[in-house]
Image (cartoon, grey):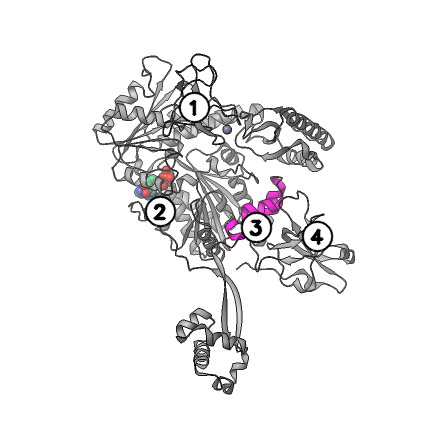
């Protein structure tokens, strides 16, 4: 378990009092100090939960102890800690420090950060029960006492004595072949000592997911891989905090490098965390780790609370060498952490979009720094943040510019959709793509088609009056889903039956415009009737295991064509994929977000990387309305450097990240003008804080964000921008410190530091 430092009051003089600093879920300030009653002194450690009185609340409030210290006589006015809620700390000191840092940096109450750090299944002791263990009482050492007992009692007691270990009453009943009566009699006579413990209800076997049939042995490393590994092990041996960016093209064999680096870590009795986008927790990725290490804990969203708790306990006891999981695995309580890896470090899923709105890369960096261990970031399309860090000397760049086995990068062909001949009438698939799919299928090759929009039609519009069917809560157009004839809001899941005629003018010829994966599937099946087709998007992948099922069918050749959203762009390694088609590369390009170009480049590059992985080569067809756009041009040439340099120059003009920092404050409320007024008064606060601090911060807004109404609430946002993240943070902190919104206004605000979507 975690080592605990000696309590500070061992050094205390008599009139000193022991004090605990406690933080809460919903009290933004603090920590608050409480007196620790003498009888609790030895039991309370940082990282434990306590019950304490807070403000005028009648019932005790749950708080987290983050520090124990000595206070002076004046501490007598402090309230007492009422109760300690945990037997052992739920996190060690470095993790407590991480909470404090996150709370400060992300301006989120520390109690909320603890909630993100410690899974709810752990806080609720999921899958545990209390069991009472029996041992012989000291008085039974006297033989004559035992001899005097009735036969059945004697037999049970002697069994327990010779067993030499504690047993539950039911275990003892089985061993002594008796009923509960003699045991209860022994209890009543005080001949048994009882000890109650909370433990896992069953010794839970780790559920080994069946692998998808892929065999991986340790490969002989390529030259690129061994050079990369050398530089990583050098960093590991230096036992210093260091950030390394492994920029390896798709198919360069990054996973093998991770595995070798972890082997090096494990050799010295330490452990590693591998963060992956949730979606790439395919059997393939997890299989690669499970086959190479004796003890791997895979964390994913489909675990039961009991399983999650069980894994967490294994990790904390130091029984695990490698933890593989999504963003929250960055908090895995490994006692001897030696390395943190972020695979596909550019992926959007590493940012949490609810409080605390942390980015796993930033948190991993902070954790690695405090433990003085390396952080390894890997990607074929590094985020500009990480790229910039290598240019400014904050991170070391390791490149793997070629694919394993010297396989060439696939040819990328752009199809200009503005040219009439290229577009197929009424369909989504151009003439060239159609021909290429046919050719590939004829050669028994497999095809991946990417369309980053789920549903059937993305707008439902009346051609007569122009009315667009929209969500009453979000004002976003509803998407038509063919299965069940539903119209669904993709922001809040509001669902109605798709109206057969216009709800405004009653015209009965309503049109389904725009394109989603369902409509594409219909078109694909009509065009290629002999192909075996599967669709992969969050609608078809709802059930646990469905992901795995489709992928292993695809691997084994039972499917010819896989179409889907960005889910299919990530991490898949299938040698027989000879063609990748991108249906509409500009779908994300014209979003009002400074990262639109970066996202497009990443998506096109990543999906293109799914082909050419075998020895039959591969090609990519990208359909686009903006073939001259820099992001699409660079992606078509596999030229990350060109993209990164051009994009950094773009961002420099406006000091956008990674050159400067951005924060966003979202204000939301039920009444539009009250919400806007609140946003304006917050802006005034920010302006005066900026003035008092002399901070160089640009303030923008309030303006309605791209999603101006969400789940029935009006939204406004304020943007802050600065070259200095500290000045940015300080301005917000000062402005919001005393900013109270009257309850009747029903307006809330959230602070998003380093927002990932604008
Ligand atoms: P990346 O993550 O960089 O796209 P992968 O790790 O998926 O690449 O590796 C691509 C393929 O190459 C995988 O099938 C992997 O098993 C294989 N591979 C990796 N390293 C080697 C090697 N040194 N020799 C032969 N095959 C390798
Ligand atoms: Zn909605």
| Residue occupied by mark 3 | 95
Are the residues tagged 3 and 4 within 8 Å (C-beta)?
no
C-alpha separation, residue under disc 3 versus residue under disc 4? 20 Å
Indicate if the residue with disc 2 has its beta carbon within 8 Å of ligand 1: yes
Circle 1 Cα neighbour tier, 10 Å, few/some/many (<14 / 14–19 / ≥20): some
Mark 1 or 3, nearer chain start: 3
Locate residue 115 relative to residue 303 in the image: left or right.
right
Q: Is 495 covered by the magenta stretch?
A: no
C-alpha separation, residue under disc 3 versus residue under disc 2? 29 Å
| Residue occupied by mark 4 | 33
User: Which is more foreground, mark 3 or mark 4?
Assistant: 4
Q: Which residues are magenta?
A: 98-126
| Residue occupied by mark 2 | 288
Q: Which residue is more in the foreground, 172 or 334?
A: 172
Q: Residue at x 66, y 26 (%)?
A: 674
| Residue occupied by mark 1 | 587
Q: Quadrant of residue 445?
A: top left
Helix, strand or loop at label 3? It is helix
């Amino acid at each position: 378990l975690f080592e605990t430092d000696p309590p500070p009051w061992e050094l205390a003089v008599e009139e000193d009092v022991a004090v605990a600093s406690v933080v809460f879920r919903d009290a933004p300030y603090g920590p608050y100090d409480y007196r620790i009653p003498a009888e609790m002194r030895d039991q309370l450690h940082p990282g434990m939960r306590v019950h304490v009185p807070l403000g005028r609340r009648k019932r005790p409030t749950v708080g987290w102890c983050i520090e124990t210290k000595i206070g002076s006589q004046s501490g007598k006015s402090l309230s007492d800690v009422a109760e300690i809620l945990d037997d052992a700390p739920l996190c060690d000191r470095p993790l407590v420090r991480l909470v404090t840092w996150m709370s400060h940096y992300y301006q989120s109450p520390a109690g909320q950060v603890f909630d993100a750090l410690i899974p709810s299944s752990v806080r609720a002791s999921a899958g545990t029960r209390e069991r009472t263990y029996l041992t012989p009482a000291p008085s039974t050492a006297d033989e004559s006492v035992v001899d005097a007992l009735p036969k059945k009692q004697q037999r049970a007691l002697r069994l327990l004595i010779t067993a030499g270990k504690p047993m539950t009453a039911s275990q003892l009943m089985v061993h002594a072949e008796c009923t509960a009566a003699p045991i209860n009699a022994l209890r009543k006579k005080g001949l048994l000592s009882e000890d109650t413990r909370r433990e896992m209800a069953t010794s839970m076997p780790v559920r080994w997911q069946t692998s998808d049939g892929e065999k991986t042995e340790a490969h002989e490393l390529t030259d690129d891989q061994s050079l990369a590994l050398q530089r990583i092990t050098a960093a590991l041996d230096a036992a210093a905090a260091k950030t390394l960016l492994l920029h390896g093209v798709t198919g360069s064999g990054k996973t093998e490098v991770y595995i070798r680096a972890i082997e090096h870590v494990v050799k010295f009795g330490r452990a590693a965390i591998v963060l992956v986008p949730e979606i790439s927790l395919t059997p393939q990725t997890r299989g690669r780790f499970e086959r190479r290490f004796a003890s791997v804990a895979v964390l994913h969203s489909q675990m039961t609370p009991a399983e999650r708790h069980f894994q967490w306990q294994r990790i904390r006891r130091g029984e695990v060498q490698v933890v593989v999981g999504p963003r929250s695995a960055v908090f895995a309580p490994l006692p001897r952490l030696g390395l943190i890896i972020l695979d596909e470090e550019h992926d959007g899923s590493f940012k949490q979009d609810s409080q605390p709105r942390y980015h796993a890369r930033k948190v991993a960096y902070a954790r690695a720094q405090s433990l003085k261990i390396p952080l390894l970031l890997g990607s074929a399309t590094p985020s500009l943040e990480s790229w910039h860090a290598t240019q400014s000397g904050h991170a070391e760049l390791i490149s793997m510019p070629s694919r394993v086995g010297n396989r060439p990068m696939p040819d990328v062909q752009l199809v200009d959709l503005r040219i009439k001949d290229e577009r197929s009438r009424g369909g989504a698939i151009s003439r060239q793509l159609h021909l290429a799919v046919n050719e590939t299928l004829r050669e028994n090759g497999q095809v991946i088609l990417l369309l980053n929009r789920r549903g059937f039609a993305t707008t439902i519009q009346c051609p007569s009056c122009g009315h667009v069917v929209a969500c009453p809560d979000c004002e976003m157009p509803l998407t038509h889903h063919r299965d069940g004839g539903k119209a669904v809001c993709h922001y809040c899941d509001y669902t109605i039956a798709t109206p057969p005629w216009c709800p405004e003018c009653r015209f009965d010829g309503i049109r389904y415009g725009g394109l989603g994966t369902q409509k594409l599937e219909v078109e694909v099946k009509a065009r290629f009737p002999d192909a075996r087709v599967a669709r992969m998007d969050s609608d078809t992948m709802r059930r646990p295991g469905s992901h795995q099922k489709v992928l292993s069918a695809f691997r084994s050749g039972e499917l010819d064509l896989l179409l889907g959203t960005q889910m299919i762009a990530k991490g898949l390694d299938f040698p027989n994929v000879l063609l990748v088609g991108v249906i509409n590369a500009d779908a994300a390009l014209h979003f009002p977000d400074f990262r639109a170009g970066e996202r497009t480049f990443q998506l096109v590059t990543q999906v293109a990387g799914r082909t050419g992985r075998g020895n039959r080569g591969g090609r990519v067809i990208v359909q686009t309305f903006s073939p001259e756009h820099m992001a699409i041009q660079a992606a078509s040439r596999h030229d990350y450097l060109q993209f990164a340099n051009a994009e950094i120059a773009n961002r420099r003009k406006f000091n956008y990240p990674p050159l400067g920092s951005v924060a966003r404050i979202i204000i939301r409320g039920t009444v539009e003008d009250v919400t806007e007024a609140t946003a304006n008064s917050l802006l005034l606060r920010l302006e005066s804080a900026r003035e008092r601090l002399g901070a160089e911060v640009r303030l923008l807004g309030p303006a309605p964000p791209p999603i101006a109404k969400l789940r029935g609430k009006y939204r406004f946002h304020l943007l802050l921008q600065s070259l200095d993240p500290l000045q940015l943070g300080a301005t917000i902190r000062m402005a919001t410190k005393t900013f109270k919104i009257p309850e009747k206004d029903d307006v809330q605000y959230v602070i998003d530091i380093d927002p990932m979507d604008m």
